[in-house]
Image: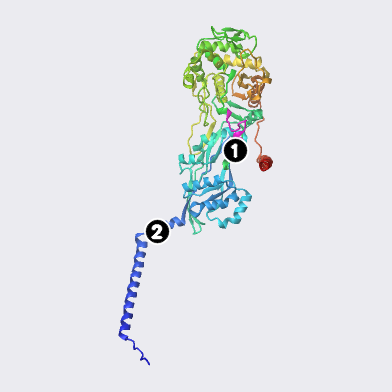
Amino acid sequence: MNKPITPNTEQVSRIFIHRIIVFGILIFLGLGGLITRYGYLQVYAHDKYTTQADNNRIKLISSPPSRGYIYDRNGIILADNQPVFTAMISPDEVEDPERTLQLLAPIFDLTTKDITDILARLNKNKNDPVTIKIDVTDAQLAQFSERKPFFRGVSIQSKLTRDYPYGELFAHVIGYVGRINDKESKRIDKDRYAGTDLIGKIGIEDYYEDVLLGQPGYQSVETDALGNIIRQLDTKPPIAGNDITLSLDYGLQTVAQQQLDGRRGAIVAIDPKNGDVLAFVSNPSYDPNPFISGISFRDYGDLRDSPDQPLYNRALQGMYPPGSTIKPFEGLGGIHYGLRNWDSTIYDPGYFSLPGDSHRFRDWKRGGHGTVDLKKSIMQSVDTYYYKLAYEMGIQRFHDWMVRFGFGEQTGIDLPNEKTGIMPSPKWKKDTYDKNWLPGETIPVSIGQGYFLATPLQVANATAMTANKGYHITPHLLKNSNGEAKVDVITKPDGKIDYNGKSSDWLRMHDAMENTVKIGTARGIYTPRYRIAGKTGTAQVKSIAQGKRYDKSAIDKRHWDHAWFNGFAPVEDPQIALAVLVENGGGGSTVAAPIGRALFDYWVLQRKSNPILPPTTDELKVIKRQKAFEKAMSDALRDKEEATLKAQEEAVATSE
């Protein structure tokens, strides 16, 4: 039997003491490390971590300003701000933005492009919330509310957005706002646009963007760990953008659009005394409201591809042969250069030929007008008179005179993207075609054909300067501005056209244009109630062979002549000057002139006693609901037709 081992008590005690010492040292070192780290955090890194804690606890939220309102001259609101529900995403609260947006796509009808655009804005903006969807519908709001706990960092806010209550009526002049795109984000001042998603794209909204925008403010708020706002710490209120009043008149604009309804064309009306633009219409037009939140590809494609080009601003950018509308200005040029006076005459056999050339430039009247002086040349729109005058004047002097009326250059109107038209000259042809000017090319230019192109705005402005006896005006839409931003407003002419004739020549031209309405080519619009001065014009679109006559019935309608009318009223104290263009209208006397008369009637006779007023708020709601219903029905029918066509194509493919 083995004997039990007796433990060495001294050895056991020594091992125990060693272990106690080792553990004591480790505990001391650990405690020392904790004390050192605590001291580092509390003293050395105090400011750093206090800042980080505050950043987690305190957020700076941008407060976008209210965009300035836009009114017509009578105080009728043309561009309004309406509160709408807007879906927002906060980049600092979302772990996987792309996944979140994909989950939100069926709720807010987001396309792949929408998601890509939002992600791009999130990458550029790490602090402020980014808009997912403007104008969230009640159905979308209900769907999101049910799932909100699963979308941390996504919220629904009430924000102001633009609304254009009269849709198509002012689209080509007011323009519209839309989401800031990549190109715009690179050039804008990001501090000015903090919290703002929209920017003026075209029209007044674009031209006066800096004035309408305002200055952003901010809110400093304390949040909890989930990002919920606990309390507001500080605030700096935003400064609203300027409200601006335009010179446009709602009633006159309405008459102009109604007169062009169903026809392509443009109307511009101007106050000859100061250049106020009273009406500015391009037809057909479009509803700018869908562009605010983002128009669908299908709807934009319909506008873009329409043969009637509703997005095309004919009044500002349409360049057309001005036809005989230029004859009053050209006739005064003959006096200016000493080539004609009111008593000198020419004989019109119905054509004109250059010396030594058998080619005949024909007058519109077969057989001619016989003996013609300047007054008769205006009343009867005698082409031959101006063929001879322009030939004697020469293209360079013709050019130098007509640019004084604003042809061949921008008028300076407060709208972006104005076209200059073409006022040809030898230099222009050399620069454009690298060819010399030929004498025969002057002849069609003399009656507003050939290389000569002008916008309806230019024709209206030249007519206004003739009405005010040669004072130079800059057409403008801004009449007044109220707010922090300072804006210069035009209130009077800025000079006078350099003219070598007598001051009475302007009045004699007024008389000739008045007789055009009384007994001349525009006699169909004469009224004894007030005095109208006018000039008709018919601009050829399709050239006619030598010796042939214009036969409208044998030509495609889109090749018919353009119809023009320009004039002013009342003659003794001009209050309105205008230009009317009807594309492929066929004749200025029968098509364009009656439109001009309707505008004159409203401005002179009806405006003050019985003005046209806009629909009430309730009526506008009914109109909008009706349009929305009609569009929904149209889209449904189109979807059905496309589905049927696709099914037919698939059936054919299967059978093959």
Q: State the residue lying farthest toward the front.
A: 656
The numbered mark at residue 163 is none
Assess whether residue 313 is covered by the magenta stretch: yes
Where residue 585 sits, quadrant-wise, is top right
Residue on which the image places disc 1: 300
Identity, as a three-letter code, of the amino acid under mark 2: Tyr
The numbered mark at residue 49 is 2
Sequence-first disc among 2 and 1: 2
Identity, as a three-letter code, of the amino acid under mark 1: Tyr
Can you give x and y, in whole percent of width and height, for residue 632 in the image? 67, 42
Q: CA distance from mark 2 to mark 1?
A: 52 Å
Q: Is residue 303 left or right of residue 409?
A: right
Can you give x and y, in whole percent of width and height, for residue 64 in the image? 51, 45
Where residue 557 sits, quadrant-wise, is top right
Magenta span: 299-314
Assess whether residue 532 is covered by the magenta stretch: no
For the point 61% across and 56% down, the residue is: 146
Can you give x and y, in whole percent of width and height, for residue 498 in the image? 48, 17
Q: Is there any visible trace of residue 56 in the rendered image?
A: yes
Where residue 365 sits, quadrant-wise, is top right
Q: Is residue 408 left or right of residue 13?
A: right
Circle 2 SS class: helix
**Residues marked 2 and 1 touching at CB (< 8 Å):** no
For the point 57% across and 41% down, the residue is: 292
